[in-house]
Image: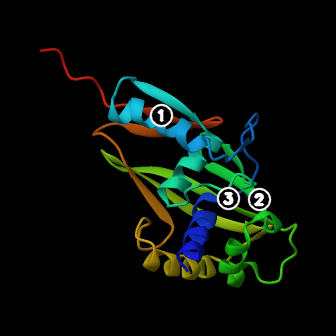
Amino acid sequence: MRTRILWTTATLVALVAVPARAQDGVPTDLIRPEGVARASAVVDSVFVDQSLPQGFVFAGDWGAYLMARLGIVPIPPALKIEVLADTTRILLRTRIGDLPPEAQQALGPMLGMLPPETIVTGVIGLEKIAREVVRFRLEAVRLNDFQVPEPVLQQVMLGVGRQYPALTRSGRALLLQMPLDANVLLALGGVRLVGPPPPPDR
């Protein structure tokens, strides 16, 4: 049951594709298990040790990092999720048939009897909501060119939110805490981590 909940969360919060045309020149990346360590190293250098003033994490590595924060550890090496990022959103893409069986079963009410080649789509937005907190929020999900109605998406995600406390109550947002006045910014091909400003000279 826990595995099903985690895969539902990971799929709907970290599994999105392009509902509209992305910015020109956006490179496609893939989620890979080793991306967690690469992203964590940058996070530690910028936010924890503060040995670097800023750092860049490729989109696929950042997707892996978010999945790890949701509890998907280890990330399956055969996972087929494409990730794109531009300055407005993080985008991912996969087919129903490429989802693990647990995820397909957990998302049954939304996926219905759709063929395995159906593309599951959506978009994740990023917003800084406090001086030390950013929020990644699932904005939409599409099945091929059909956008899942908002009431349906809300209902599915409310159920996930009640069972998985890493998300907000709506089940659609993941909060990331940072040092005071640090930031996470969307960039072409990934995210840029900006550390806190240096203390003033005394």
Rounded to the nearest whole Å, what is the CA distance between mark 2 and mark 1?
27 Å
Give neighbour class at mark 2: few <14, some 14-19, many 20+ (Cα, 10 Å): many
Q: Residue furthest top?
A: 201
Query: x%, y% of residue 7?
Result: 61, 68
Is 141 placed left or right of 40 in the picture? right
| Mark 2–mark 1 CB contact (< 8 Å) | no
Which comes sooner in the sequence, label 2 or label 1? Answer: 1
* Residue type of the residue flagged with mark 1: Ala
Secondary structure beneath label 3 = loop
Residue 109 higher or lower than 145, as above or below: below
**Observer-nearest residue: 103 or 148?**
103
Is 90 placed left or right of 114 in the picture? left
Total residue callouts: 3
Which comes sooner in the sequence, label 1 or label 3? Answer: 3
Q: How is the image coloured?
A: rainbow
Q: Residue at x 47, y 32 (%)?
A: 42
Q: Residue at x 58, y 80 (%)?
A: 156
- Which residue is the site of mark 1? 41
Query: x%, y% of residue 91?
Result: 67, 51
- Give the numbered dot on residue 16: 3
* Residue type of the residue flagged with mark 2: Thr
Of labels 1 and 3, the one closer to you? 1
Q: Residue at x 62, y 81 (%)?
A: 152
- Which residue is the site of mark 2? 94
Which quadrant of the figure has residue 58?
top right
Residue 181 higher or lower than 118, as above or below: above
Which quadrant of the figure has residue 175?
bottom left
Query: x%, y% of residue 6?
Result: 55, 69
Secondary structure beneath label 1 = helix
* Residue type of the residue flagged with mark 3: Val
